[in-house]
Image (cartoon, rainbow, N blue to C red):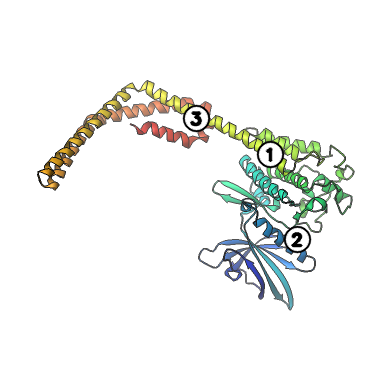
Amino acid sequence: MAVNPKKRKILEENLSHDLKWDSLIQHEHIGTGTFSVVYRYFSKDKEQKSYAVKIMKSDEESLPKILEEIKFLQILKEIPNSQSFIPMFYGWVKYSEKSDGIKTEIFALVFEIAEGTLGRLLKKRPQGITFEENLSLLKTIAFGLYNLQKRGIAHRDIKPENIIYFQEKDMVIFKIMDFGEMKINVENEGTVKGTPSYFSPETNFAFLNDEDHINVDYNPYKSDVYSFGITVLFANLKRVPFDKVENIGSIPGSMMNPHKNYRRIEEKKVNPLTNEKGPYDEKIKGFIKEMGEKFEKDQGVEQLKQLLEKALEYNPKNRCDWKDFKRLLKEIMKCREINEINDLKKVIEFKDKAIKILIERNSELMNLLDKEIKQKDMAEKTLNELLEEKLLINEEKHNEKEVIETVLEKLISLQEIIIKEEDEKKGKAFEEKKEIVQEMVLKEKEPNLKAFEKNKFMFEVYFFQIFAVF
């Protein structure tokens, strides 16, 4: 049901793709953050296209943050292929709203709409996401944040609530969301930002010790990698590898779910920049092992475990950044490609064996095929003779219609003779051949079940090609 808006006055409109603010109508509430509320809007035309509109009230505290986010969104739009890892940003509108005599300036940021956040997806998945969805998540985030790293941009608040997903047929596509904490040239800007549950150890160390800034050696990209590693563990096991000690609520400048935040107080006295090991290392290793057991039958799981171990190193000097992360991810994909090629080879071998068995066990059928080819040759020869006859008759200026009818009659007669003589033999031979192949499939299918099922369509094509000649 549409929501009746309060009295509004447009102050500034900056929308792309021929989109107009007055062509949109507010529909339903989607989510709420520290400084914003997100609604679903529909276009008023016949398509009734959906949009996600982020509404933010502008005041002395929030205005710089809003303008910074808009600035980042404009920069991100210019990155090649950015729509593969961030949602489409259509622009923004600034309007004033008067309620109970109080006038407020409001910014509305318009995005393509997703199915929801990763956090919301996990509420539907008691066992977490699948291995294929893990690969989709890893590739999107690694590609996206690697591209941001090349431009000196860090996200600084990676967590399930800041990753959105889109359902495309049987695939789940992930994208990065919420750019309020992003920073350009952030290497020398070590302000504590993010969500405590997903803090990197160096961020948490500064936070617990009430420090405004993280150590000068702070690497924001490696900090993002750690936050993402914890996010991946949560996406698979539905929990994070830390003890819940104290609910701390939210901290300024962070959009978070208070019930999921707690102090990792054991890290307070263990500076990650001077220590190789952290107090939660063993627990993290246990989580990675548990995740590995969940996907023990999936190709590439060992490489995935190694990637997570590297992403979750306590000391950031030992941790990978997005460039290294992307390289390690390629190892997973390479492993899976090799196994897919091996699976395909098995199917091809299976197909070759099927053809060999058909040839060995169906000599009669081959002879029949031989005979049929000869009969087709005879039919073609007869047709050519008839055509020549037609030409001769035409030269003698006979009626062309009569000639065509004569040719057709002779062809039909020839066709009926071939069908009558061979149809019964062909039908019987085909059924015998079909039973042989079915029996062979049952015997050969079991050892190669996984490869067969994975490439079932390809085999069916080959199978059809074998029968098509008959």
Compared to residue 466, the image places residue 68 above or below, namely below
Residue 434 percent coordinates (x, y): 37, 29
* Nearer to the camera, 217 or 249: 217
Q: Secondary structure at mark 2?
A: loop
User: Mark 3 to mark 2: distance in Å?
Assistant: 55 Å
| Disc 3 target residue | 347
Q: Are marks 3 and 2 in contact (CB under 8 Å)?
A: no
Q: Is residue 277 left or right of residue 14?
A: right
Dividing the picture into quarters, in which one does residue 291 lie? Answer: top right
Compared to residue 339, the image places residue 91 above or below, namely below
Which callout, 1 or 3, points at the residue further toward the start of the chain?
A: 1
Compared to residue 248, the image places residue 468 above or below, namely above
| Disc 2 target residue | 34
| Disc 1 target residue | 327
* Placement of the N terminus among the 4 image quadrants: bottom right
Residue 284 percent coordinates (x, y): 77, 38
* Nearer to the camera, 459 or 181: 181
